[in-house]
Image (cartoon, rainbow, N blue to C red):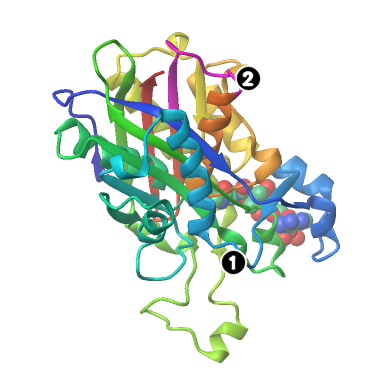
Amino acid sequence: MPEITNNPNLDSIRIAGTGSYVPEKILTNDDLAKRVDTSDEWIVSRTGIRERRIASDAEATSDLATNAARKAMEQAGVDAEELDLIIVATISPDTFFPATACYVQRNLGAKNAVCFDVSAACSGFLYAMSIARQFISTRSAHKALIIGAEKLSSMVNWEDRNTCVLFGDGAGAAVITRAEGGDSGVMSTYMGSDGNQTDILVVPGGGSACPITPSNAEQRLNTISMQGREVYRYAVTAMRGACDRVMADAKLKSEDISMVIPHQANLRIIDAIRERLDVPQEKMFVNLEKYGNTSAAAIAIALDEANRTGAIKRGDKIVLVAFGAGLTWAAAAIHW
Ligand code: COA
């Protein structure tokens, strides 16, 4: 399977600050049960999700991203003009072009940054981390802002109970700098892809393959289509493999890990990964009950919450692992 793994000869990078933002509006399972044939009991028992956030009409993905970015920059003590790289991971960009990262650049006044988006669905934030790592550890860039941001509510079919209960809106961000001495930093990163599985999780319409027309808009081809069971099966296998790889590269054993921050899609998937890693439940960071699956934003929001609530502390060894459409998967091992 195509994959890009660790280069141990690179300079070390660290996460200097994290931030996150979720919209105010809460949509509960009971709210959804008024729209489609579902129930709080079904959703909680199959996924663990209890509610999700929904952005207002006035909020675009770049607005969510900008709010998260400001918090990460404040924590890192980094001004907008110091940034030389902004990467936004998203599958719900403000527009096909320009990149959402350019809107964020404008919002922040980050006039010295090079900006682009990454499309790797739920693995996007970790893809962005790997990319930023290459630029910073080779000293091509010095202060990078990576963001996972999604307004998935804009591409959900609200009449499809198979998908509409799963997704939500939000953004998370991190400022990445070179690690100046000490042990802390990103120890290993890993990315994988399998383009043979493009069909099992896809928005089929709206792109060049199927431009939107009134008739296919009526068929909701511009919304998320998913084969849930297939996705589930691949997700467990790929995330387990990704954890094994970053832990081996970082020379970490299960007992060394203080916290695993997995993609927040489904509690049962998280449990399956936990069993493989053989870590206790309290070492799996879970917040999906509040936000659902926010794709590229999920790990970024979880990382920020873990950081700000003290669930992860300086010196901890943590593993981040994600899986998403593409298919894509990715992981990182970090000495916090
Ligand atoms: N409420 C009530 N019933 C629902 C429902 C809902 N929201 N969604 C689906 N169902 C029904 C199905 O129609 C099916 O009914 P049927 O047997 O009469 O056809 C039944 O529940 C079982 O569906 P199934 O797909 O077998 O359930 P599942 O146990 O696999 O759970 C998912 C469904 C989507 C929760 C699960 O497959 C999953 O989480 N997959 C991964 C999705 C994911 O993580 N995507 C993002 C990856 S980044």
Give the quarter of the figure containing the C terminus.
Answer: top left
N-terminal-most mark, 1 or 2: 1
**Residue type, numbered disc 2:** Gln
Q: Residues within 10 Å of mark 1 (few under 14, many from 20)?
A: some
For image coordinates 51% across by 46% down, the residue present is 297
State which quadrant residue 99 falls in.
Answer: bottom left
Identify whether 97 is placed above or below 163. Answer: below
Q: Secondary structure at mark 2?
A: helix
Residue behind mark 2:
281
Q: CA distance from mark 1 to mark 2?
A: 33 Å
Of labels 1 and 2, the one closer to you:
1
Q: Position of residue 111 (x, y in %)?
A: 29, 53
Horizontal placement of 291 versus 197: left or right? right
Q: Can you identify the residue that label 1 sits on?
A: 154
Q: Residue at x 47, y 76 (%)?
A: 205
Q: Residue furthest bottom?
A: 214
Q: Main secondary structure of the magenta part?
A: loop
Residue 317 in magenta? Answer: yes
- Tell me where the magenta segment starts and ends, as one range: 309-320
Q: What amino acid is at disc 1?
A: Ser
Tell whether position 219 is magenta. no
Task: Assign the N terminus to one quadrant of the image.
Answer: top left
| Vertical order, 124 against 284 (above or below) | below
Coordinates of residue 141 in the picture (x, y in percent): 20, 39
- Checking the image for residue 137, the label placed there is none
Residue at image coords 40%, 76%: 207
Question: Residue 231: in sight, yes or no?
Answer: no
* Of residues 83 and 186, the one drawn nearer to the viewer in this rendering: 83
Q: Relative to 121, is 137 above or below?
A: above
